[in-house]
């Protein structure tokens, strides 16, 4: 892998390695995970130069933050110091794992941050963001509370997550916003019409999750794969019945292009997101060192205009079958309204 050029997290944030590591799947949402392999994967990412680690306080009810904290404590000092930790807060869970709402009240923001600092074992959080917009609390109040944490040194930068253009404008009028974390992939391109123009106008970066659509366009997912009840994809519309058949047909079209490029399907999909602009940092949810190495290989894939045209022809915008979340969860996405 060649030495990549760092990318800015917006006009007010730090420069980071062009691919970040999303750590959620190491604790939850995609079936059982291997703790030892998860720690080794975080260490391998840091060794490769990755700087941005993304987690959330509600990922397995704090387990993921503790895992990331352990990975940082056991990493070599130089690697630990390069790490920047992004944390999402506000999504509330019941003891059985059920989702019970969003809390963006200022007092709750400070409470959530206190617990995250403890679980991570750090004295500050690099980027702190509300996971989903709280419909009962103005975004100005939530962002204002995070801004107070910035003033006191507990948080370095303020981010946003899955919010629409109007909310972005209101947030940035309250305090400097570093980046918007939002799903963006070949088959999830909803940000292109209204949201991306606004973030670029305001100097806000994009940290893109779901770049491989939860493995759907990784080139590794098969029609006969059995998913456990604790796997998000067992309930995701894009992984059901005829939707899955249609979406995997799209993947086979991508595979033809990838083979001509000497790349894997996953590398092609990641390279496409990287090609969308230097203000976009893909977050890859690699759970193993093998998948991490494959993802980082995308940095050596160069796409010219002919390649991009072929990819667009194979997977046009809105080509995916099925919504990216079940209907009940879609209702909580301010970015979709």
Image (spheres, helix red, strand yellow):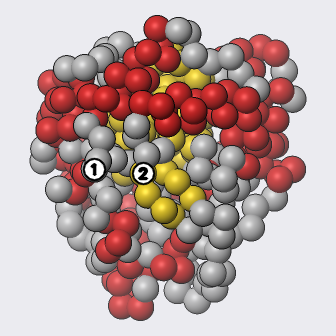
- The structure residue drawn at horizontal position 60% and vertical position 43%, both measured from the top left corner, is 57
Quarter that holds the C terminus? bottom left
Q: Secondary structure at mark 2?
A: strand
The answer to whether residue 100 shows anywhere in this view is: yes
Q: In the image shown, does 15 or 304 lie closer to the viewer?
A: 15
- Residue at 57 percent of width and 16 percent of height: 154
Look at the picture and state if 165 lies above or below 317: above
* Residue 118 x/y as whole percent: 73, 29
Circles 2, 1 touching at the beta carbon (< 8 Å): yes
Q: Which residue is mark 1?
A: 135
Residue appearing at x 36%, y 31% in the figure? 142
Within-10-Å neighbours for mark 1: few <14, some 14–19, many 20+: few
Q: Is residue 155 left or right of residue 175?
A: right
Image quadrant where one finds the N terminus: top right
* Sequence order check, earlier mark of 2 and 1: 2
Q: Which mark is residue 102?
A: 2
Q: Position of residue 119 (x, y in %)?
A: 73, 35
Q: Which residue of the protein is positioned furthest toward the front in this rendering?
A: 107
Q: Is residue 213 above or below residue 31?
A: above
Task: Tell me the number on the disc at residue 59.
Answer: none
The Cα–Cα distance between marks 2 and 1, rounded to whole angstroms, is 8 Å
Decide: few, some or many residues near mark 2? Use Cα within 10 Å; few <14, some 14-19, many ≥20: many
Q: Position of residue 37 (x, y in %)?
A: 82, 51
């Amino acid at each position: 892998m060649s030495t990549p050029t760092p990318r800015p997290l917006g006009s007010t944030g730090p420069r980071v390695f062009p691919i970040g590591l999303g750590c959620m799947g190491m604790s939850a949402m995609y079936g059982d995970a291997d703790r030892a392999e998860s720690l080794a994967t975080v260490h391998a990412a840091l060794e490769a130069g990755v700087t941005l680690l993304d987690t959330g306080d509600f990922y397995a009810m704090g387990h993921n933050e503790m895992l990331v904290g352990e990975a940082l404590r056991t990493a070599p000092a130089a690697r630990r110091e390069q790490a920047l930790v992004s944390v999402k807060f506000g999504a509330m869970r019941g003891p059985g794992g059920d989702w019970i709402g969003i809390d963006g009240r200022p007092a709750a923001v400070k409470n959530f941050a206190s617990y995250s600092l403890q679980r991570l074992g750090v004295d500050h959080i690099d980027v702190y963001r509300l996971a989903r917009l709280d419909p009962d609390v103005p975004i100005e109040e939530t962002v204002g509370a995070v801004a107070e944490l910035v003033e006191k040194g507990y948080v370095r930068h303020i981010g946003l997550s899955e919010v629409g253009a109007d909310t972005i404008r209101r947030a940035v009028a309250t305090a400097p916003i570093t980046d918007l974390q939002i799903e963006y992939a070949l088959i999830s391109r909803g940000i292109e019409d209204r949201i991306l123009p606004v973030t670029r106008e305001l100097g806000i970066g994009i940290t893109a999750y779901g770049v491989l659509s939860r493995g759907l366009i990784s080139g590794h997912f098969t029609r006969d794969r059995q998913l456990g009840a604790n796997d998000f994809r067992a309930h995701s519309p894009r992984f059901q019945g005829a939707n899955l058949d249609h979406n995997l047909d799209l993947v086979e079209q991508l595979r033809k292009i990838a083979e001509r490029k000497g790349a894997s399907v996953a590398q092609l999909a990641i390279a496409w997101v990287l090609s969308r602009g230097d203000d976009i940092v893909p977050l890859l949810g690699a759970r193993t060192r093998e998948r991490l190495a494959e993802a980082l290989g995308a940095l050596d894939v160069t796409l010219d205009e002919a390649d991009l045209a072929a990819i667009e022809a194979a997977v046009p915008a809105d080509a995916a079958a099925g919504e990216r979340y079940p209907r009940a969860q879609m209702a909580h996405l301010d970015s979709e309204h």
